[in-house]
Amino acid sequence: MSTRTIAERFRAALADAPPPAAGPWIVAVSGGLDSVVLLNLLRFVWTERAELVVAHFDHRMRPESGEDAEWVAGLAHGWDLDVRVGVAATPPRSEAEAREARYRFLDEVRVSVGAALIVTAHHADDQAETVLFRVLRGTGRTGLMGIPARRGHYLRPLLGFWRAELEAYARRVRLTWREDPTNVSLHYARNALRHVVLPDIEKLIAPGARRALVRLAALAREDETAWQSILPAILPPLDVADSDSAVSVDRAALAALHPAVRARILRRLARSLGVILDEAATTLATEFTGSASSGFSLDVGGGITLRRELDRVWIGAENRVPEQPDRPLVIPDAGPGSGEAWLAGRAVPVSWGGPDVAGGLDVASFDPNALRFPLCVRAREDGDRIRLPGGSKKVKKLLLEARIPRMERSAVPIVVDALNEVLWIPGVARAAQAGVAGDVLTIGVG
């Protein structure tokens, strides 16, 4: 393959994922073959050149790692490029820890120089190894997508190139690079896949295994793109609604979906609350939403509970501690006044006896001479009952009949008198004994 062909494909890869124009680009350079080729292509082949800043992170996992940093700095200066070198405070104890430290450094450099992108040298062999590694660990469909060409601030324009192609290019243009001896150590899982598992698979089972794994990643990305394209049509019938730290959906509409689609919807809703449902939790949640009766709940982990309430399913932190404790509001007498009660972390405006009582509030009028002051606006308590024209009734049952979800009942304001008798539940019911005769006291509750 000619150098020109490599150049054309590289320009096409950048054109397929158009990057932002503003700001420099951070190029992650370890000193190895892949990153040196990447830097060369960006510096000398890509015609729409941005300002490049070389970033190298010394993990301190080898005695000679400091020499790699000096070599990369020399290469950057020789190509008239700025360079930033980071050094690990302590050597990482694992591949995952090393990766985390490296990406943290790259993001710090990006922020410090106001960069638009971080460009890394992941290539097709890396893609194949990543997909196989995830398959062996039992990944789901999104895991099969492998390494994305573009995500967030990261761009990987070499994913369409095989390492053998990059090495052929490097030799043609007479590049030099550093060899990392740890890259052949079978102590690391990635190296075992690269040097033993994949070669044996291609030799003994499937000669085109690497290409098949890359194709599998492309097919998984295509499927995910298709799913995302139909999601806007699926969500509206579910009547998704947010309430504090919870999300609710129409239960019948959700249950009518195929279980596999229902599972994906549930994972998406849980993810919006910062929780990732694993396979077991997803299975339980899918079954629950299809069959649970009203009032039942299911703990799916991560502090998240599913609960069936009447015709809706709620996903959220059912036992969430309010941002501040309840603070009932006292109405001392029939004179005008206003204030706020705090119920379930929500401010409830209250006004009484004045000219502006009705402004945006639920209102009710009472005979002040028949009231036992002080009155109180508070949340429901166990044992609360209200006397209606047809007899006494539990407030809990009344709220259920009003189809107020259990997760919202602690925020429903209740007006009681000095003997703790319920006078009024705004928007729900008014006690039979709280009539109006003669003078009038109007109370408004938000």
Image: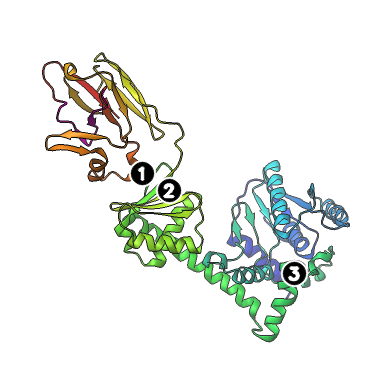
Please indicate, yes or no, whether residue 169 appears anywhere in the rendered image.
yes
Q: Are marks 1 and 2 in contact (CB under 8 Å)?
A: yes
Please indicate, yes or no, whether residue 360 appears anywhere in the rendered image.
no
On residue 407, the disc is 1
Check disc 1: other Cα within 10 Å, few if <14, some if 14-19, many if 20+: some
The residue furthest top is 335
Kindly identify the residue that appears in the image at 30 percent across and 30 percent down: 446
Between 106 and 339, the residue placed more toward the observer is: 339
- Residue type marked 3: Asn
> What is the distance, in whole Å, between disc 1 and disc 2 at their CAs?
9 Å
On residue 191, the disc is 3
> What is the distance, in whole Å, between disc 2 and disc 3 at their CAs?
42 Å
* Image location of residue 220, percent across then percent down: 53, 69
| Most common SS among magenta residues | loop
> In what element is the residue under mark 3?
helix
> In what element is the residue under mark 1?
helix
Above or below, comparing residue 245 to residue 157 in the picture: above
Q: Which residues are magenta?
A: 419-434
- Residue type marked 2: Gly
Q: Nearer the viewer, mark 1 or mark 3?
A: 1
- Residue type marked 1: Met
* Image location of residue 101, percent across then percent down: 72, 51
On residue 316, the disc is 2
